Image (cartoon, grey):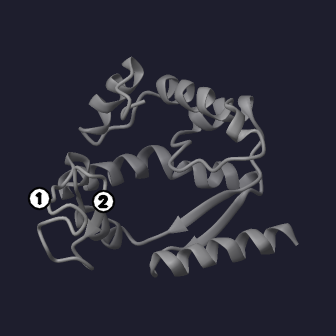
Amino acid sequence: NIKNQTEIGKYAKQFIEKGLLVPDEVVDKIVANRISEEDCKKGFILDGYPRTINQADALGGITKLDYVIVIDVDYSVIVKRISGRRMCSCGATYNTSTYDRSDCAVCGKKLFTRDDDKEETVLKRLEVYEKNTAPLLDYYSKKGLILKVDGSETVEKTFENVLKALNNANN
């Protein structure tokens, strides 16, 4: 919606750029529309949704969740990872921890930091998370849906840990 510059996407972008949560009813509509599409009939993964109890209630009215995977990472690591992210207009993504150049390896263009990846915006998002999203851990824990995974390691190791948690939950 944001990428395609739909009306609802443009509206949502205003909040995201300020590090604020998009209003529940807007996100609920975007998610409901998306998961009703054909390619979601056999299943789907939601990333970053729901973020509030109200969104969780709305989602529960639309579909039944199998699991909620919580990738547990210390805030200092989150800030370092996100604020170190660099983008290229060609779509390539880098991180300063593994790529120390200012130009894109794919097309040679100059890399940039997205507004919502700046450290002050990330810190604001973490404050919002504590206030609005952290209560979801208790909400879904009471429903027995939480699978907690250590996300402080590499992407590959974290992915491996997610697969292990899912396999263990299904056995």
Q: Say above or below: 83 vs 91.
A: below
Mark 2 residue type: Ala
Left or right, 116 with respect to 47, comes to left
Q: Say above or below: 123 vs 8.
A: below
Q: Say above or below: 39 vs 37.
A: below
Q: Residue at x 74, y 68 (%)?
A: 166
Left or right, 25 with respect to 11, comes to right
Q: Which is nearer the eye, 102 or 120?
A: 102
Q: Sequence-wise, which precedes: disc 2 or disc 1? A: 2
Quarter of the figure with residue 55: top right
- Does dot 2 land on a helix, a strand or a loop? loop
Q: Which is nearer the eye, 117 or 58?
A: 117
Q: Residue at x 37, y 32 (%)?
A: 2
**Residue lying furthest front:** 107
Quarter of the figure with residue 157: bottom right
Q: Which residue is mark 2?
A: 92
Mark 1 residue type: Lys
Q: Which is nearer the eye, 126 or 85?
A: 85
**Residue 76 in the image: x percent, y percent?**
31, 71
Q: Residue at x 18, y 55 (%)?
A: 113
Q: Which residue is mark 1?
A: 110
Q: Say above or below: 122 vs 17.
A: below
